[in-house]
Amino acid sequence: MSEKQLEHAANEKIVENQEESERDDEIIFTLFVDGKIVSWAKTLLYSYLKEIHTVRKEKRKGFGRKLLVYLEKNAKAHGATTMKTSDFDPCDDEAINFFKSLCFELKPVVSGAKGSFEGTKIL
């Protein structure tokens, strides 16, 4: 496991942990503010966003946005031309609005009886 710490401001830090396996390369990014975790995300090979979360009491403060913008820049620096995400609930207005505000193109996906959304953004 490799770990990189990236200082952004006196009280903010993004930590990158990479887990390598035969099936995929998962990278976990964690945003700390004043030493506390406020947001985290998991990607595959930098450009596929598997999940992103912000601590409930820290929502609406821009931490998820800050982390995703960092992920996009990082993906681009690793040669990616798009950032993709998928499999989020079409009833999750918070997620839909979040991704739309960051210029992701969203489209519905139907898989069996379950529907979901996926998003793509050109970097």
Image (cartoon, grey):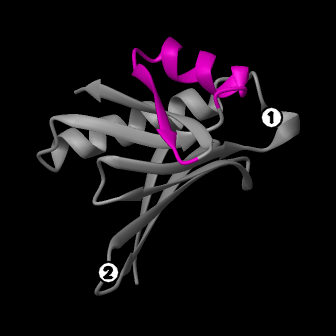
The answer to whether any part of residue 9 appears in the image is no
Q: Position of residue 120 (x, y in %)?
A: 33, 29
Looking at the picture, does residue 59 appear above or below residue 67? above
Q: Which residue is mark 2?
A: 23
Which residue is rendered at x = 65% and y = 42% of the image? Answer: 11
Q: Which residues are magenta?
A: 90-112
- The amino acid at mark 1 is Glu
Q: Which residue is mark 1?
A: 58
Quarter of the view holding residue 73: top left
Looking at the picture, does residue 59 appear above or below residue 56? above
Q: Quadrant of the N terminus?
A: bottom left
The answer to whether any part of residue 95 appears in the image is yes
- The amino acid at mark 2 is Arg
Q: Position of residue 114 (x, y in %)?
A: 62, 43
Looking at the picture, does residue 112 appear above or below residue 61? below
Q: Nearer the viewer, mark 1 or mark 2?
A: 2
- Residue sitting at the far left: 79
Which residue is rendered at x = 64% and y = 28% of the image? Answer: 90
